[in-house]
Amino acid sequence: MKVTQVEIFHVHRRPNSGQRPILVRVDTDEGIYGLGEAGMAYGVGGSAAAGMIRDLAALLIGQDPFNTEAIWEKFFKKTFWGQGGGTVVFSGISALDTALWDIKGKALSLPLYKLLGGKCRNDLRVYASQIQLGWGPIREAKSKKEEYAEEALKALADGYDAVKVDVLAIDRDGSTENVHLEGPLPPSSVKLGVERVRAIREAVGEDVDIIIENHAHTDTVSAIQFARAIEEYNIFFYEEINTPLNPPLLKKIREKISIPIASGERIYTRWGYLPYFVDHSIDVAQPDIGSCGGVSEFRKIADLAHAYEITLQAHVAGTGVAEAAAIHAETAIPNFCIHEHHQKSLLPEYVELCTHNYQPVKGRYAAPELPGLGQDITDSAYRNSDRLLVK
């Protein structure tokens, strides 16, 4: 079996969305194709991943898709920028690597998790992610503490027993424009965040886990300050609380707070995670299969984390392709923590891109039993994308 062509889909932006998923289809001479997704598909510069996939695809034509290790190493060592690459390089590698694993599963008529070692569990515990944007098919920033409680209760009604929320990024007027969270926080900022956390805890009770997400808007000083202000609310973990670019700083925070720390969506490859694992400054690692290096690298990061007694969850903020890849990979690792179900997964513009709308049932996910990822893209993805073919 040989790779014959690679097609890149840069999905058109919907009005008021700001999101442009980047999908890839890798075809072979035996008529089997695989799908992947780039994690770097939002934020300023998100489109760069499409160009990276295009350049890497030229190295993939004619290769045996079963040789994922050799191909990954070729991308890493023979491109010059692979060693030292960041989000752009590894998002491109990730999309293509995932598509190759999808091909292998389809060729062998096996779901992906079986190729990764089989089931370590029958289902996955799931949390509702980013409820500050609303929990439902409409994305809208919330400002009032009562709204935060209401959105958490919506998730509970859907069967979740854990929610994730950023309580600092949006001001009382529902804006993010003038929110600055570096250095010592003024009492008004701390009070606003604490009010929202308290409202959620009082609404959901003591048996529901709350995850606090900071999106690296806080720094060493403010992360410690806010952690101490919310410790009494029994926070499950505290996520991306400072820049991932200076690992020793997180160790300093770790020594000052008692809440478990999670990070990883902007950390790439096992080498990127190594200093955090050695310092044990991360309690829950969060590699994104769409940017950490793909399915191949996710498994290696998980194994490395296991050696340091660190649990893992995939960061997921993409379409049903990314969702399916994460479910399979998490099913097959012994040190799984909890699965992220992002608010984006409820949006119509994401749901319409994939043939299977995998959603949790009573707050639990089970891996698809179809071959490969168990996912495909729809006519809508073909029609509503800028497409580029590499042969």
Image: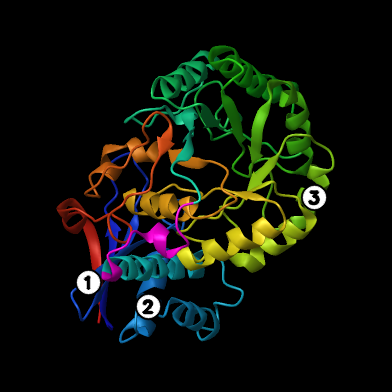
Residue 18 occupies quadrant: top left
Within 10 Å of disc 1 (Cα), the crowding (few <14, some 14-19, many 20+) is some
Is residue 119 depicted above or below 178 in this figure? below
Q: CA distance from mark 1 to mark 3?
A: 46 Å
- Helix, strand or loop for disc 3: helix
Residue 302, horizontal then vertical, whole percent = 59, 58
Residue 278, horizontal then vertical, whole percent = 77, 60
Within 10 Å of disc 3 (Cα), the crowding (few <14, some 14-19, many 20+) is some
Circle on res. 251: 3
Residue 196 occupies quadrant: top right
The residues colored magenta run 107-119
Q: CA distance from mark 2 to mark 3?
A: 39 Å
Residue 104 occupies quadrant: bottom left
Q: Residue at x 51, y 49 (%)?
A: 315
Circle on res. 158: none
Q: Residue at x 56, y 21 (%)?
A: 172
Tag 2 near tag 1, CB within 8 Å: no
Q: Residue at x 43, y 24 (%)?
A: 155
Tag 1 near tag 3, CB within 8 Å: no
Q: Is residue 181 left or right of residue 323?
A: right
Q: Residue at x 40, y 78 (%)?
A: 56
Q: CA distance from mark 2 to mark 1?
A: 12 Å
- Helix, strand or loop for disc 1: loop
Q: Is residue 390 left or right of residue 292?
A: left
Specify the amino acid type for callout 2: Phe
Circle on res. 32: 1
Residue 266, horizontal then vertical, whole percent = 58, 55
Specify the amino acid type for callout 1: Ile
Residue 79, horizontal then vertical, whole percent = 50, 83
Specify the amino acid type for callout 3: Lys
- The numbered mark, 2 or 3, whose residue comes first in the sequence reads 2
User: Which residue lies under the disc numbered 2?
Assistant: 66
